[in-house]
Image (tube, rainbow, N blue to C red):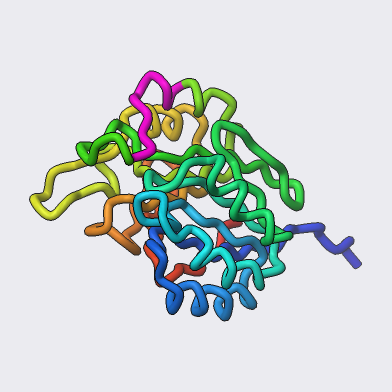
Amino acid sequence: MAPKKNVRDPMKYLCFSDLHRDTVAAANLVSLAADADVVLGAGDFANRHLGINDTLEILAAIDKPTVLVPGNGETAEELRSAAKIWKSARVLHGEGCEIDGIDFWGVGGGIPVTPFGDWSYDFDETQAKRLLNGCPTKGILVVHSPPIDTVDHDTTGRVRGSHAIRMAIETKMPKLVVCGHIHCDWEKQVVLCESRILNAGPRGVLIEVD
């Protein structure tokens, strides 16, 4: 009899973004997390730095390993402070971690700089390039802002994503890229090179990755 192959089952990710204090959506994510191996949150828990705890207090019931990045509505420091109650979650911003042998990298904030003014937690493309510098090859990338000309079309059809994020994807070829930020393209997916890119949205999307 031939030896049994040691093949990893596909990982199931629950991906979401842009809750913006929506407690109903947060409660739904808690239910969906039961079917996931890892949870990925791509930012914007607050509205203009207000109410970040509204959803974090609900999401803290999720016990699956979780990676979060800040949106442009909260800073990395604000998210780290609020997420202390969520024992299974870790916040990444210009840094990475490993879960079950898989490499993750996270970068939050609005990229490029948004037109929203001083309240928005934004970074220009040069800053973004530095934050993405350590992104691993063939890992999982969680960003708030999408790569340009992918899932980043606003209400006028104009693309609003980041050149630096796109360049990182083309170079590092992550298996999965989860983002948000551009509401018009919530739940849309595209493939760039070999990378699957999802603009997640607040309802949550369960996705399998080999």
Q: Determine the residue positioned at 45% across, 74% down.
A: 23
In the figure, is residue 156 to the left or right of 4?
left
Q: Is residue 3 rendered to the left or right of residue 77? A: right
Q: Quadrant of the N terminus?
A: bottom right
Residue lying at the far left of the rendered structure: 156
Q: Nearer the viewer, residue 69 or 48?
A: 48
- Residue 143's x, y, as percent? 46, 43
Q: Is residue 197 visible?
A: no
Residue 136 or 23: which is nearer the viewer? 23
Residue 206 at x, y percent in the picture = 51, 69
Residue 13, above or below 162: below
> Residue placed farthest to the front in the image?
50
Q: Quadrant of the C terminus?
A: bottom right
Q: Which residue is drawn at the image coordinates 44% and 23% (left, top)?
A: 129
For residue 198, above or below residue 207: above
Rendered image quadrant of residue 31:
bottom right
Q: Residue at x 44, y 34 (%)?
A: 169
Q: Residue at x 60, y 73 (%)?
A: 33
The picture places residue 126, in percent across and down from the top left corner, at 38, 19
Question: Count of labels shown?
Answer: 0
The reply to whether residue 194 is visible in this rendering is yes
Q: Identify the image quadrant of residue 2.
A: bottom right
Is residue 121 found inside the magenta-colored segment of the image?
Answer: yes
Q: Is 3 a magenta residue? A: no
Q: Nearer the viewer, residue 24 or 173?
A: 24
Residue 124 location in percent, x, y?
34, 25
Which range is magenta? 120-129
